[in-house]
Amino acid sequence: MRYVFEQLLLPVAAEYRPELVLVSAGQDGYRDDPIAGMKLSTAGYKEMAALVRRIADRYASGRLVAVLEGGYHREALGECVAGILEVWLEEGLAVESGEKVPVAAVHPQVAAAVANVKEVHRRFWPSLGG
C-alpha cells in the first residue's frame, strides 16, 4: 500500500493541493479480515495514516476528516482505529516518509496495476507522467 500511496496518492495530492482531506477509514484490508484478503497489519494502517496526515498538514493546514466504515474482524478493528488515531493525534509528526519502496520489492501485479492507473490518469494528472 505504501508503494501505491507513493506512486499515486502523494503525487496527485501535491498537484491538486487539497484544502480538506476526507478519508473513508475502512479496516477491511486487515490481514485477518474475512472479506478483503489484503493482509494489512496495524503498522501498515499507521503508516498509511501518517502519509494521509502528511498530505493534510502540507496542503490543507491539517484539516482532516475521517468516516469509519468497513472492517469485519472485531478485535482488529479497534486496534487499527486506535493506531490511526494515535498517528493523527501525534504532535510533531515527521513530514517525510523516508526512502521510497523499491519497485523490485512490490508484487508484480501491484506494480502492473499502478502502471495501468498511471497510464489512464496521466492525461488528467501530469504528476503521474513518469
Image (spheres, rainbow, N blue to C red):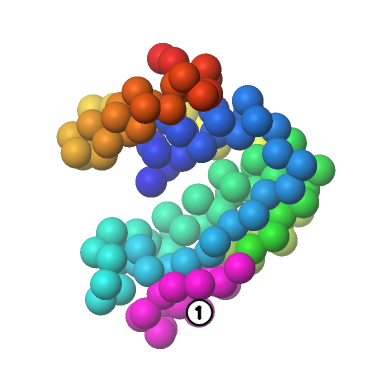
Instruction: Answer above or below: position of 81 versus 103.
Output: below
Q: Position of residue 101 (x, y in %)?
A: 37, 32
17 vs 53, nearest the viewer: 17
Residue 48 included in the magenta stretch of the image: no
Quarter containing the C terminus? top left
User: Residue lying furthest left in this view?
Assistant: 108
Residue sitting at 30 percent across and 27 percent down? 115
User: Residue lying furthest bottom in this view?
Assistant: 74
65 sits left or right of 11 in the view = right
The mark tally for this picture is 1
User: Which corner quadrant of the image does residue 11 belong to?
Assistant: top right
9 vs 116, nearest the viewer: 116
58 vs 120, nearest the viewer: 120
Instruction: Answer above or below: position of 102 versus 29.
Output: above
The three-letter amino acid code for the residue at tag 1 is: Gly
Residue sitting at 35 percent across and 63 percent down? 29
80 vs 8, nearest the viewer: 8
Residue 74 included in the magenta stretch of the image: yes
78 sits left or right of 15 in the view = left
The answer to whether residue 64 is seen in the rendering is yes
Question: Badge 1: few (under 14), some or many (20 or more) residues near its Cα, within 10 Å?
Answer: few
Q: Position of residue 64 (x, y in %)?
A: 71, 54
Q: Which residues are magenta?
A: 67-83
User: Residue lying furthest top in this view?
Assistant: 130
Residue sitting at 37 percent across and 27 percent down? 120
Residue sitting at 54 percent across and 61 percent down? 24
From the image, tell me which residue sits under label 1.
Answer: 78
User: Which corner quadrant of the image does residue 31 belong to?
Assistant: bottom left
Helix, strand or loop under label 1: helix
Instruction: Answer above or below: position of 95 versus 63.
Output: above
